[in-house]
Image (cartoon, grey):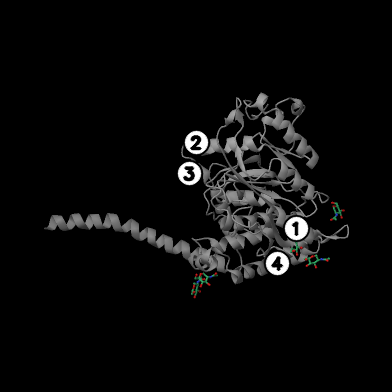
Amino acid sequence: MAWCYYRWRRVLICVCTPCISLALLFVYVTVMLCMATNGTTTSGLDAVHFVASGNNPKTFWELHLHGDAFWNRLQRTLDNHFNPILCLNNTKRGFENGTFHKPLLTQGFSKVINSDSTRRNFDQLPQQIQEFISHMQRRDYPALLQPDGVCGAGTKEEKEAPLLLLAIKSTGQNFFNRQAIRRTWGQAKWVAGPKRNGNGGEGGGYVRRVFLLGKGSTEELGVNASVLLQMESKQYGDILQWDFKDTFFNLTLKDVLFWSWFKRSCGRTRFVFKGDDDVFVNTPKMISYLQDQLKKPRAHKTLQDFMVGDVIAAAVPIRFNKSKYFIPDSFYKGFYPMYAGGGGVVYSGLLAKRLHDMSKRLNLFPIDDVYVGMCMVRLNAHPVHHPAFLTFDFPNKEEEELCSYHTILLVHKRSPDEVVKLWAHVKKTQAQCWDVPLREANK
Ligand SMILES: *[C@@H]1O[C@H](CO)[C@@H](O)[C@H](O)[C@H]1NC(C)=O
Ligand SMILES: *[C@@H]1O[C@H](CO)[C@@H](O)[C@H](O)[C@H]1NC(C)=O
Ligand SMILES: *[C@@H]1O[C@H](CO)[C@@H](O)[C@H](O)[C@H]1NC(C)=O
Ligand SMILES: *[C@@H]1O[C@H](CO)[C@@H](O)[C@H](O)[C@H]1NC(C)=O
Ligand SMILES: *[C@@H]1O[C@H](CO)[C@@H](O)[C@H](O)[C@H]1NC(C)=O
């Protein structure tokens, strides 16, 4: 009896003592952290990460958010609100039904914008940054024009989900770019992979197309541009236009609003291409490249994170005030995350939906591809670099080789006329060049 009693007491002591210590430690840490967030200063919290850093040592967290620049401070308040360890309360309140809790965010925003250091600097910021800041809280711009049906025009006859949706950033005046794309690489239809030895293409899939536009100035050459665009939309059913001013620093809105439309209207699509309207895409090659991705083992898992393009690592903001990319260091401090150049990038539909959710926890940033990179870091996903995405054109004289355009997935930049000629050239050389592989690094 006595032996049994001692044995159980020892077991109890062994098991319970660490539990009690851990519980006490947890309570202590939680109380300290919550006191720190609710206090006037948040500077003690820089070290709190809640996204695993993965295998990329230079994470966003370690490099970027320490600074006292405007965006950094703003993002820190948002992170604190959504940090599940810091304040469970806020996470629930702040993220109701997967949407922003407006009052909470406005509160955080006005705290930062009314702080002394922001007020002192605001007038010295360039005009377009000021413009950006004054509108950066708004993202609920209504759609003015939308494709009818599901996911672009003419989906009725399709028996399976589209393989690829082409989402192309355009502007009102770039009508000729859109026409060239519609007639060439952006045809919405069943696209076979490249023909193998004259036999039918192997694999293939449905391609859909949508152009992403904001609102331009309405008068052009005395013609009402919005009337023209309405007609174009009626004719082709591939225009997605929102009610915001189509400026460079508003491009990020095209990403977040596109993701939201995609999730609602196009969610079964396997892959999304997002790019500019002055690029040439080798669509058949792209289709077969994407089919290969689907055939890989554990594809469903890897596609959760799949993004491929011309990946830029360890870039820094441009501090030269004549550049259109100029970001002053009072606005943002630190490196940019690894990101895929916005000229053209491909990601999975699964990832598009995850980016959509993550974007709700991240303040808009004026440069769109950097913003997507920021969302990726937070998803702990890494864009993959592929040398067949030539967002800076062909190196040297490679272009002059007969089959050069069969070795690429994308090239920037090409005028509408060039796009039409290139498409004809690619069709004509198909039989000769069907087996050339995609470009590899260091070619
Ligand atoms: C948590 O929520 C309750 C009620 O909603 C509120 O009274 C309390 O102050 C909140 N705590 C924190 C730390 O925000
Ligand atoms: C969340 O959903 C509930 C029920 O669907 C709704 O009553 C509530 O208004 C929603 N909250 C927000 C912030 O949208
Ligand atoms: C152009 O047309 C739109 C839609 O019909 C109309 O709302 C707008 O006022 C017109 N703009 C001008 C400058 O006429
Ligand atoms: C973005 O669009 C909004 C709405 O049209 C506009 O008020 C704002 O000035 C634009 N922002 C920039 C940076 O151009
Ligand atoms: C750009 O920078 C130069 C020197 O750094 C400064 O003199 C000039 O005023 C700046 N221009 C603008 C528009 O801020």
For numbered disc 4, what is the local secondary structure?
A: helix
The residue under label 2 is which amino acid type? Answer: Lys
Q: Which corner quadrant of the image does residue 391 belong to?
A: top right
**Residue 85: where, in percent of width, then height?**
49, 60
**Residue 301, numbered circle:** 3
* Residue topped by disc 2: 296
User: Mark 4: few, some, or many residues within 10 Å (few <14, many ≥20)?
Assistant: some
- Is 338 above or below relative to 220? above
The residue under label 4 is which amino acid type? Answer: Ile
* Mark 4 → mark 1, Cα distance in angstroms: 42 Å
Can you tell which of label 1 and label 3 is closer to the viewer?
1
The verdict on label 4 being within 8 Å of ligand 4 is no
**Residue 231, numbered circle:** 1
For numbered disc 1, what is the local secondary structure?
A: helix
User: In the image, what residue occupies the spot 52% across and 49% down?
Assistant: 52
- The image shows a total of numbered marks equal to 4
* Mark 1 → mark 3, Cα distance in angstroms: 42 Å
* Residue topped by disc 4: 113
User: Mark 3: few, some, or many residues within 10 Å (few <14, many ≥20)?
Assistant: few
**Residue 389: where, in percent of width, then height?**
67, 37
* Mark 2 → mark 3, Cα distance in angstroms: 10 Å
Ligand 3 lies in quarter: bottom right
* Mark 3 → mark 4, Cα distance in angstroms: 41 Å
Confirm or deny contact between disc 4 and disc 2 (CB under 8 A). Answer: no
Can you tell which of label 1 and label 2 is closer to the viewer?
1
User: In the image, what residue occupies the spot 66% across and 69% down?
Assistant: 111
Mark 1 or mark 3, which has the lower sequence index? Answer: 1
The residue under label 1 is which amino acid type? Answer: Met
Can you tell which of label 2 and label 3 is closer to the viewer?
2
User: Mark 2: few, some, or many residues within 10 Å (few <14, many ≥20)?
Assistant: few
Mark 3 or mark 4, which has the lower sequence index? Answer: 4
Q: Which corner quadrant of the image does residue 205 belong to?
A: top right
